[in-house]
Image (cartoon, grey):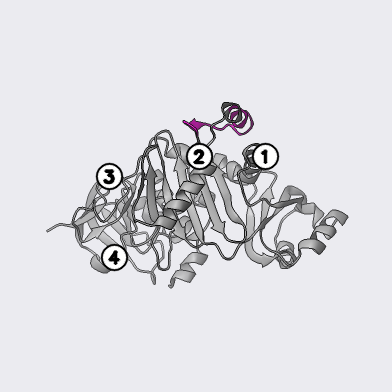
Amino acid sequence: MHLPDLYQKQISITEWFENIQHSKTKILRNEDNLKRDRLQIIHDITGLPFDKPYQFNAIDLTPPTLQFKKFLQEHQHELCALRLIPKDPALPKLRMRGKTIKDSLTWFKQQDIQPKNYKADFVPHCENTLWSSIFIVNSKCIFGEVIRGGHNQLTQGFHDQEKPISFLFDLKYLQLSTSDNDAEKYIQDIINYITITNQKTQQELTQKVGATFLHNYLQGYFESVYSKEFGTWFIDYNTTIAQMYHDFVPMVSTQSNHIKSLISGQVANSGIVQGKVRLLSTTNQSSSPDLSADEILVCTMTTPDNFLLMQKAAGIITDQGGMLSHAAIVARELGKPCLVATGNATKILQDGDLIELDANQGIVRKLP
């Protein structure tokens, strides 16, 4: 199975949590459904740029109201991501990306829904994203990842050429896993956007969106993108995920601080475990039920097909991914030692190898 096929298998973080029956699934789903409403409030107060949608009740689309007809006439050829957001949180959220607003209506009519139960958000879509980020502001620091290109490389964990650049800002120094002036400038720019120095503004955000702050930095889980066409957009703000990492301080691995090892990578969840390798190739992504609890899952990148394997495995090692990819977040919630972005684990390790996964230092050792 090639990487484009694996991309198609990816699902939202809420769906990942549903599959592992996480206790915060309902809270996460509700927060995801309302994220652009909260971003709108933050924008109105601070000017934070975000991918502001054109919002309608889905019932306005069929039959189309006069207001929607006017909107369609003016914007029908623009690319969008259409989000059907349920008014009842128990209903599924449906989404489509990359079609024109006019063509997205064909997809909308194919959905088996009661339009009265949904809102329809037409979110602007940019095909030429130059930079993307995922980062968290918690009670101790700001950390995350940036990459050239689309943010799906970060959320899904599959990247074609360049690896994500991890970063840590301890409120004094900014450390990057790879020296890159353009990446450093982008990181500083996005941190500036969530820097709120005015105390009255902080109080207003606390009242209206339940905001909390690390000194003058708005706490939360954030995703952002940058393009020449639109500049910087924040596309996610989530407090539930940030709370899961409330005191986490990552080890940002650089070439200078890596312990010499055949396999090293970025720690997604700490811990040390020994066990035999269960190698999963891109041509064999099924959730095999016979993995033993003492085996360590090794693969290009975990996908939704791997839920059972992730739950059973003693630990997880991937070639690609980042510490805040959806699958890495899930591995952390499962309590599995997890090492990502090794680049070569599936090439060096073989089925049955006895290894030690040291996800405290970010390395893998072969054992005799």
The residue carrying pointer 2 sits among few (fewer than 14), some (14 to 19) or many (20 or more) residues within 10 Å by Cα, namely many
- Callout 3: helix, strand or loop? loop
Towards the viewer: 149 or 5: 149
Which residue is label 2 attached to? 220
Q: Please tell me the numbered disc located at residue 44.
A: 1
Q: Answer with left or right where residue 34 lies relative to residue 73.
A: left
Mark sitting earlier along the chain (1/4): 1
CA distance separating discs 1 and 2: 18 Å
Mark sitting earlier along the chain (1/2): 1
Which residue is label 4 attached to? 344
Rendered location of residue 115, percent (x, y): 76, 53
Mark sitting earlier along the chain (3/4): 3
Pointer 3 and pointer 1: residues touching (CB < 8 Å)?
no
Which residue is label 3 attached to? 271
Q: Quadrant of the C terminus?
A: bottom left
Q: Nearer the viewer, mark 4 or mark 2?
A: 2
Q: Nearer the viewer, mark 3 or mark 1?
A: 1
Q: Quadrant of the N terminus?
A: bottom left
Mark sitting earlier along the chain (4/2): 2
CA distance separating discs 3 and 1: 43 Å
Pointer 4 and pointer 2: residues touching (CB < 8 Å)?
no
